[in-house]
Image: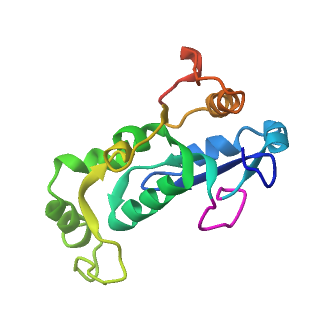
Amino acid sequence: MTTSTAKINIATTSLAGCFGCHMSLLDIDERIQDLAEVAVFDRSPFTDIKHCNQSDIGLIEGGVCNAENVHVLREFRKQCNILIAVGACAINGGIPALRNNIPLKECLEESYIDGLGVVNPQIPNDPELPLILDKVYPIHEIVKIDYSLPGCPPSADAICAFITDLLAGREPTLPDELIHYD
């Protein structure tokens, strides 16, 4: 537990994905009040904090598709005692990883040169843009994770049950009815 507040510190972040896992977190609705009695949200959809303090639990969604994602993921890992890969994108690359079977050069040319409605055909090369990786990686290929919470996205009930188990000091378990991929 965090000693200054006597509450568990929870942080979240998102990489390459649709933000659906964060939407499921927000969908825990009034149960957030129960959670707020024992936990403080650091970096999350509830705050505008860009960099988190040391956190007891970190929830991360999305795959790793560019150099900025790698940096965010590594920094987030350093700040989280327990890191949970949330959703299909974090666990196996999800929908963003569909590009993994196509060479990156082809993807970029299709999007920026040959695509429908392209007005000024050129592949962006501004140094301010994060370097795109050769493929989309699941987060466990970049950093150590402690738990995986499956789903696309995991339901609010699954997220709530998972966090509740951790806060109670239990190994998180999910019954089959809480796991879905829709």
The residue furthest top is 176
Where residue 123 appears, as percent x and y from the top left, is 23, 76
Taking the image as shown, residue 179 lies to the left or right of residue 48, namely left
Judging depth in this view, the residue of 145 and 175 nearest the camera is 145
Q: Residue at x 67, y 28 (%)?
A: 157
Q: How is the image coloured?
A: rainbow
Task: Kindly indicate the quadrant of the structure image that contains residue 42.
Answer: bottom right
Where residue 59 appears, as percent x and y from the top left, is 56, 45
Chief secondary structure of the magenta portion: loop
Task: Kindly indicate the quadrant of the structure image that contains residue 32.
Answer: top right
Judging depth in this view, the residue of 116 and 110 nearest the camera is 110
Count of numbered tags = 0
The residue furthest front is 3
Q: Which residues are magenta?
A: 43-53
Q: Residue at x 28, y 66 (%)?
A: 132
* Position above or below: 17 against 156: below
Taking the image as shown, residue 58 lies to the left or right of residue 163, namely left
Q: Is residue 47 magenta?
A: yes
Quadrant where the N terminus is found in the figure:
top right
* Position above or below: 32 against 161: below
Where residue 22 appears, as percent x and y from the top left, is 60, 48
Judging depth in this view, the residue of 41 and 8 nearest the camera is 8
Where residue 162 appears, as percent x and y from the top left, is 62, 29
Q: Is residue 52 magenta?
A: yes
Q: Residue at x 45, y 51 (%)?
A: 17
